[in-house]
Structure formats: structure tokens, C-alpha cells
Amino acid sequence: MAILVAGDFAIGWGALFAVVELRRNFNLAFTQARLPVEKFALDPPIVILFALSLIIALALSGFYQTRATPRTHPSFVTAIIIQIALTAIGGIALVRPLPRSVLLAVPVLELIALPFWRRLLGAIAPVRPRDTILIGNPHDLGEALTRLRLAGDSRIRVGEKITLDQLADPATHALLRDVEEVILVSPDADPRLRLELLRIRGPRGFLMLASHVDALLASRTRGWIGDQPLVEVAASCGYGFSAVMKRSMDIAGGALLIVVSAPLWIITAIAIAIDDHRPILIRQERSGLGGEPYGMLKFRSMRDDQVTRTGSFLRRYHVDELPQLINVLMGDMSLVGPRPERPEIVARILRDVPDFDLRSLVRPGIAGLAQVSAEYDARPEVKLRYDLMYMCDWSVWLDVRLMFRAVSSSLAGTGR
């Protein structure tokens, strides 16, 4: 997909360059004169306007859909008309008059180049169909297969078809874990089945046909079976490009926060040493990604199970948690994610809340949705709901918001 979009962008750029150079070097019968540089400069805003408007027009016309529906017949002519409108509006917004010959000739070249580019890309790198397992009751499985055949979606290859009663078989778990994609086609099945599938599949999760109730809650459609919408159930920040983006934010943000807060580290270390001597830092065992234990760093705030005078201040303003930024750089933690628990506490909670282990699908965080939204002593099942909401609806903007709310909470002195 990235190569396809990059090629489309290059076509938009190249078509603009070719038309402008043609106008500058040749007198054309339908134009009054050559196009001088001072009248229409090929600067970055104009190049981005033409190329980006092409990308947006293609996306709006359905050329970047990864799944087919019975109505998926995108038209290049439609996309070009949309691009002309977007470019004209963009020119007005930039207060840049666009020559009519350029505005109309660029889409003509694009209309010639785009089909050729797609055929070339299809020959060099043909789309590989996704290996997919369908799971559901027999009636829903049959109906889903019929809809897939009618849609003619060559980008999906159905292998196994698993009925709900086969889920108790460990061999079935292995199939579901290893296959590229899983689609639950019985949306009215027991909701706990979704949690079990998420546990089996890990952060990649699965797709499911949306029931009437799911349609009220689902915010993003991830595809279709026939004309029925598919929604995704996955810890989106735990795999693929989103995981890379989140980890990059952790490294850059963690390093920046360490540099900015360095004076506070020094002051805190001196205060602890004067008040209660050493050690300055302590390491506490916590349950991390995949349930693996790690050593979480903190400024020491207690001595003999009693909070020290300095420790009371550190806890109130969450300063004792600053060393966890080192854990973030080491890859044990994230800036935002479910708050880590001690392994023995996790084992105790699992006896009453067996789905609590789903939190370990992603790295634990210094800040989290449950920490800024729920009460300090909220029940484990309440924290789990917040954490699952965070994991399955992750976005860069959500992380930014939670980090700012965590900082605001720290400055307000809400710690204990």
C-alpha cells in the first residue's frame, strides 16, 4: 500500500512538472502565451497541493480499500473530477491563481499514467491473498462463504472453517494463533468468545462481523464480507506499524523527559540522601509484556514499611516514578499503557478476574487510561475495562492526551 500511494504521489508531481514545462517552452493553440515562472512557480505548496489532492481523490473514490464489496468499482474519471475540485479549492485557500490549462491538463496526464502504474505494480509485486480462517456456527459460515464468492475478493483466501464447538481443541488454538487473519462470522455468539480469541491471537486480534449492538459501538470499519461491515478487535498498539510508532514515541519522549527533568532527579537524590541516606533508587518486581517479570525502578520513598518525610512528598507529586523513564528506554515499559502490578498480585487477581492477563498484550505504562479516569482503589475488573478500551482504541492522539493528563494530575498532587 505504501508503494502504491508513493507512486500515485509521484505521478501527481510528475504530471504537474511535465505540463508546466510544456507551457513554458511551447506556444499552444489554446493558450494565449507561454507560462512565465513568476506567474506560476513550482514551489512546495503547489506541488503538495496537486499531488496530495490526487491521493485524497483516489482514497475517496475507493482505490485504497483493502477489501472488496459488491459495489467496489472505483473509477479513475470520478477520482480526477474530485481532484480538480480539491485543487481549485486549495488554490483559493492558498491565494494562488491556477492557470486553467494546468488545472485541466495535469489530470489528463494522470488519467493516462495511473492505470499503467497499477498494471506495472501488479505485474512486479502482485497482491498476495491473505490466509484466513473463518469461525462461527455452520449457518453463518455458509452465508459468509457465499458473500465472499459474490464479492469476488481475490485478496482473501479462506483455508480452515472452524465451528464454535471446535474451540476447546488445543490444535484449533494453534491454527488460530498461526494464521494470518481470523474472522468471526457469528456476531451473536457469546461475547466472552471475543476475549478468548484475543487471548489466543495476541495483539493482532481478529476481525468480526458487527451485530446491531456492535454497530452502535464500533468506530472504525476494517472491511466487509459482501456488504456486511467487519470491525477489528485487536490491541492495535501492540503489533505492526502502530507498535513501531508507539515505540518510537516512547524512545523520543522518554529521552526528552529525562533531559528536561534532570535537575529534579539531582534534587530528589540529594533530598533522599540527606533525609534517609541510601539507597536512592530501588527495583521492584513487576509483571510486564507477555506476563514476563522485570525490575521497575523508583526513587525510594519508604524505610521499614514506613513512608519517609521526603517519600511522602515524592509520592504526592509522583516524582518517585521518574526513574521508570529508564525502564521505558530499556523496553520494559511504555510512556502510556496499563499500570504494572506485582506478579503475586496478578496471580491473586486472576482467580477472580480470569481475563486480567489480557493487559499483558502490550507493555505496561507509566501513565494509563485507568489511572487518569478511574478511582485510585478501583476494582481490578474496572481497571481491566479501561485498559482494554485503551489497547483496542489506541491512537497517537490518545497517548498525547493521557500523558498531558498524567502530568496535570502529578502537578495537582493527587498521588498517595
Image: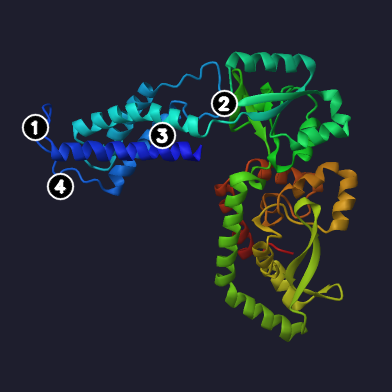
Mark 3: which secondary structure?
A: helix
User: For mark 3, what is the residue?
Assistant: 56
User: For mark 1, what is the residue?
Assistant: 32
The earlier-in-sequence mark between 3 and 4 is 4
Q: Is residue 265 above or below residue 394?
A: below
Percent across and percent down for residue 277 are 77, 85
Please say whether residue 97 is visible from this viewpoint. no
Mark 4: which secondary structure?
A: loop
Q: CA distance from mark 3 to mark 4?
A: 28 Å
User: For mark 2, what is the residue?
Assistant: 67
Question: Residue shown at 16%/37% (left/top)?
Answer: 23
Q: Nearer the viewer, residue 307 or 153?
A: 153
Q: Amino acid at mark 4?
A: Glu
Circles 3 and 4: CB distance less than 8 Å?
A: no
Pair 1/3: label in front: 1
Question: Residue shown at 43%/40% (left/top)?
Answer: 6
The earlier-in-sequence mark between 2 and 1 is 1
Mark 1: which secondary structure?
A: loop
User: For mark 4, what is the residue?
Assistant: 38
Q: Amino acid at mark 3?
A: Ile
Question: Residue shown at 59%/33% (left/top)?
Answer: 219
Local packing at callout 2 (Cα closer than 10 Å; few below 14, some 14-19, many 20+) is some
Q: Amino acid at mark 2?
A: Arg
Please say whether residue 225 is visible from this viewpoint. yes
The earlier-in-sequence mark between 2 and 4 is 4
Local packing at callout 4 (Cα closer than 10 Å; few below 14, some 14-19, many 20+) is few
Q: CA distance from mark 2 to mark 3?
A: 18 Å
Q: CA distance from mark 2 to mark 1?
A: 47 Å
Circles 1 and 3: CB distance less than 8 Å?
A: no
Question: Residue shown at 60%/58% (left/top)?
Answer: 250
Q: Quadrant of residue 203?
A: top right
